[in-house]
Amino acid sequence: MIFALVFVSFALFASCSAEGGKSSGKPAPGSDDSESLQEETEEPEKQILDSLPKDLDFKGAKANMIIRGGGAYGSGESEFYAEAENGEILNDAVYKRNRKLEDRLNLDLNVIVGPDARVYDSALNMIRSSIRAGDYDYDIVTGMATSFTALALEGLFMNLHSVDYLDLSQPWWNQNIVKEATIGGNLNLLVGDASVSMLAYSMILFANKNIMAAYQLPDIYQVIFEGKWTLDYMYGYIKDVHKDVNGDGVMDKEDLYGFTSSKSGPHLGAFMEAAGIKITKIGDDGLPYLAMDAERMAALLDKAYDIIYSNPSSRISNEQDYDMYILTGMMKNDRALLVPGAIADAEFLRDMETDYGIIPYPKYDEKQEEYFSRVAPYYTVFCIPANSVTSDMAGAVMEAMASASHATIMPAYFDVMMKIKFARDEQTEKILDIIRGSAYMDFSTLYDSSINSPWNMFYDLLGKKSTDFASWYEKNEPKIQSGIDNLIQKMEDMH
């Protein structure tokens, strides 16, 4: 049910239509002329950063890689599949990367587009059936993190620490996941710079600049850069921004708000990660353990409740149609100052006439040194089937793809698509750098559904207008602990 809601929110398919924007010596915003961006997205030979042998040669072998179909812009097909160059920046960067990878390793990269997210169980069953049958249909399997953990716990994936040619210490592999998802020395899921969805699913707040000016609000960017963008500051920032626009005496989605959101997990749950909440930590023995700061969690609930329910400028709804189309529609029509979403949801605002900004969720308080950005667990992970007889080729493809993506795909998506097409000012570019560098990914967010879903707590309680964390924790702590213990046992039994 949760995923169905998220899919509606994130089901973005890029149109890449032209839009106006600033001139900064870069290609004009909205330009889809990939030639004009060649210097920014092309990978010179000197930018091959990995240490794969120069004479590595797989003699024309076919490397079968299954991916999910559809997905948000920046995930699934748009991350890995490009049939030909078409002038669209990300597509062309992916096409060139794949062709260069084939030439470099002398192989045929066969990208198999599986079922899309709406029927994702079909993809899982395809992969599960193939591996259990001892078939060799796929050399590399990729898919949505929150679903692939189930396959990992069934023992269907290889330990990536033992795969030739993978250098997991390199910056193109997400080091948080390398550390946090390695359980007792075993790592089955990997995330890297080939997973553009890491950025696509980073949760942020869209900010309407017209409303900021109308209400003479402080420069939000300066507040953020000074480290003052906190939960308390957010409460004060939005508290006077509300108006019965249609004059019917009822505040509804036709009126003006300082903050409006659905009750979905990604939207409300992002407050937890932004506050630096840790549910688990990794011990010296390499195993996860329950480490929730109950006092901080209870205080966070109180602060978030005040923003959402005690503030006349907030509107939270669980209406079925209260998805990103409605939320971004309110933003475009100057009826919402702040709206939550994923970075990929900026696609909904491509035709917005009013300037808008992209900002992080607020910190817990000013003592918190860093901003943290939730990455909804729908990003793409890489795996190798446990029965693989071509793991060396799979490892080489994964390493070459991640390395090349570090030099080309991330610049294409982040620097070009995000900073030029979506961002409307230089300050937003700096904010995007903060968000990219503060991606929150750890064991508990990756394996959430396997440890009795503790990350659901925040929107479960707030959705019921409750802040009774103590009762929730008393009831659920044994379940979470049991989930962690069972997961560790499964991992140890597999190896």
Image (spheres, rainbow, N blue to C red):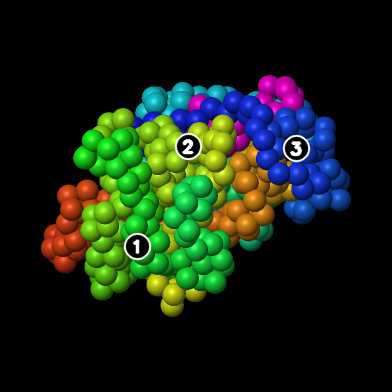
Residue that mark 2 sits on? 332
Residue 451 pos. (x, y %):
29, 53
- In this rendered view, identify the residue nearer to me: 116 or 34: 34
Residue that mark 1 sits on? 235
> Is tag 2's residue or tag 3's residue first in the polypeptide sequence?
3
> Is tag 1's residue or tag 2's residue first in the polypeptide sequence?
1
Q: Is residue 212 above or below residue 16?
A: below
Q: How far is disc 1 from disc 3 in space, using C-alphas?
A: 37 Å
Residue that mark 3 sits on? 28
Q: Secondary structure at mark 1?
A: helix
Q: Nearer the viewer, mark 2 or mark 3?
A: 2
Q: Quadrant of residue 169?
A: bottom right
Q: Quadrant of residue 296?
A: bottom left
Residue 410 pos. (x, y %):
67, 46
Q: Is residue 490 left or right of residue 432?
A: left
| Residue 204 lies within the magenta run | no
